[in-house]
Image: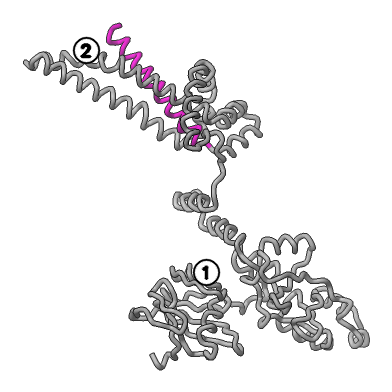
Amino acid sequence: MDDIDSLILIAVLIALTAFFVASEFAIVRVRRSRIDRLISEGNRRAVLAKRIITDLDEYLSASQLGITLTSIGLGVLGEPAFERMLHPLFAGMGLPDSAEHVISFAAAYALITFLHVVIGELAPKTVAIQKAEKLTLWIAGPLRLFYLLMFPIIWVLNGSARLLTGLFGLKPASEHEGSHSEEELRILLSESLKNGEINPSEYTFVNKIFEFDNRLAKEIMIPRKEMAAVSTDMSIPEMLDMMLKDKYTRWPVTDGDKDSVIGMVNTKHLFSDLLFMTEEEKAGLSITPYVRPVIEVIETIPVHDLLIKMQRERIHLAILSDEYGGTSGLVTTEDILEEIVGDIRDEFDEDEQPLIQKLSEQHYVLDGKVRIDQVNHLLGASIQDEVDTIGGLVLKENIDITAGESIYIGRFTARVLEMDGRFIKQIELKEKSGRLGALETKNHQLPVPETIILQNATLSEK
């Protein structure tokens, strides 16, 4: 065989190596969902590609066998051929024969290794990772043909490998599920956001859906203290004054006390009838005919389950009960949707303030209902406590706290801005100018800044 024939054969072997390397990476990288979509669109090559990625273990073995055979061929043929071609270059240098042979061999070996690694391995791997779908469709036919031709050898090799890996309790690649855990999906989303494949809004929505599934109804409820309700012992004018003031669509109806919610009334139904009533009819009007059923559930029900129940029963308001049977709060479908899409404001929400207001860097105003996990995310902290909200945390440490007084949360000063009785409505959170060491509280001693440092004090005392 002359040098030209050798070079042609070497080029063919490198090309085959590149084919098998690209096949191996492409069939592992390609998305099954995309192949299924192409099949539904009538792509015939996708049908064969689906068969290959379904029997992944078999075709990975075929790719590995192809890479091994071509690599052996390059070693047997390439190195001697290059050595023969390079030998004349070193012959005229006056080197000893042994040195010429060693140098020629080393140069030939380096050259064939370079071509094999760069052209046969690295380049096709990069292409396969970036163009996995197109390459899988292209290589499906040839790889299937090679698999059929080499089936006996592949069967023996696969069987031997399965016996070996079976000793360690490992399964073939084709038996592994292609699903991703929630944490893996979050990582994929972060990478997609970083690479510009999705926008920040999409990233936020999907992350909120993950968090939504772990929420309990009591974490998003309107607490009993803030519930606006009408009572059966109120007159219609009194009810109308309340409804026109607060402008809610649905109102819980109580039998004199918030622990006894008998249903709800939709203001649209009431107001539409009032338009066509005489003054005499309005004077004798009772709220009872307008009362509709309301969902009553325990406050620890998952938000996801509550949403399904509300959809199934077509009721948009749920009353939450605590473990003692008392009313703890209410949840509307709007409250649930806001967990995914953020605040939803209508024409009556002009004065509504967001739960978290950022005034400047490291300076916030928080609603007392902001959850501890939200505070942790905001501050990069790891506060852990049995209470659910920042207001509850402050109140737990100082039941007698009043508006204007402060406590410390890590490196932040938390000052109560507004209260309604014992209920903390707003808190200002601002980073302190200096840093404090660990302070002992009546409950525990905690480090700064990850966990909470609490000490009752007014701002004037600090």
Q: Is residue 105 left or right of residue 389?
A: left
Q: Residue 33 sits in which quadrant?
A: top right
Q: Residue 342 sits in which quadrant?
A: bottom right
* Eye-nearest disc, 2 or 1: 1
* Range shown magenta: 1-30
In terms of depth relative to the viewer, which is nearer, 439 or 245? Answer: 439
Question: Around disc 2, counting alpha carbons within 10 Å, would you say few (fewer than 14), some (14 to 19), or many (20 or more)?
Answer: some
The Cα atoms of the two marked residues, 2 and 1, are separated by 71 Å
> Where is 12 relative to 301, above or below?
above
> Where is 139 relative to 201, above or below?
above
In terms of depth relative to the viewer, which is nearer, 124 or 59? Answer: 59
Q: Which residue is mark 2?
A: 84
For this orientation, the residue located farthest to the top is 1
Can you say which quadrant of the picture contains the N terminus?
A: top left
Residue 416: image x %, image y %?
Answer: 51, 86
For this orientation, the residue located farthest to the left is 94
Residue 169: image x %, image y %?
Answer: 50, 37
Residue at 81 percent of width and 77 percent of height: 262
**How many numbered marks are there?**
2
Residue 11: image x %, image y %?
Answer: 35, 18
Give the secondary structure at mark 2.
Answer: helix
Instruction: Tell whether label 1 touches label 2 (CB within 8 Å).
Output: no
Residue at 52 percent of width and 33 percent of height: 172
Can you say which quadrant of the picture contains the C terminus?
A: bottom left
Q: Which mark is residue 373?
A: 1
On whether residue 112 falls in the magenta region, the answer is no
Q: Which mark is residue 267?
A: none
Amino acid type of the residue that numbered disc 2 sits on in the rendered structure: Arg
Residue 263: image x %, image y %?
Answer: 81, 75
Question: Around disc 1, counting alpha carbons within 10 Å, would you say few (fewer than 14), some (14 to 19), or many (20 or more)?
Answer: some
Amino acid type of the residue that numbered disc 1 sits on in the rendered structure: Asp
**Helix, strand or loop for the magenta stretch, by majority:** helix
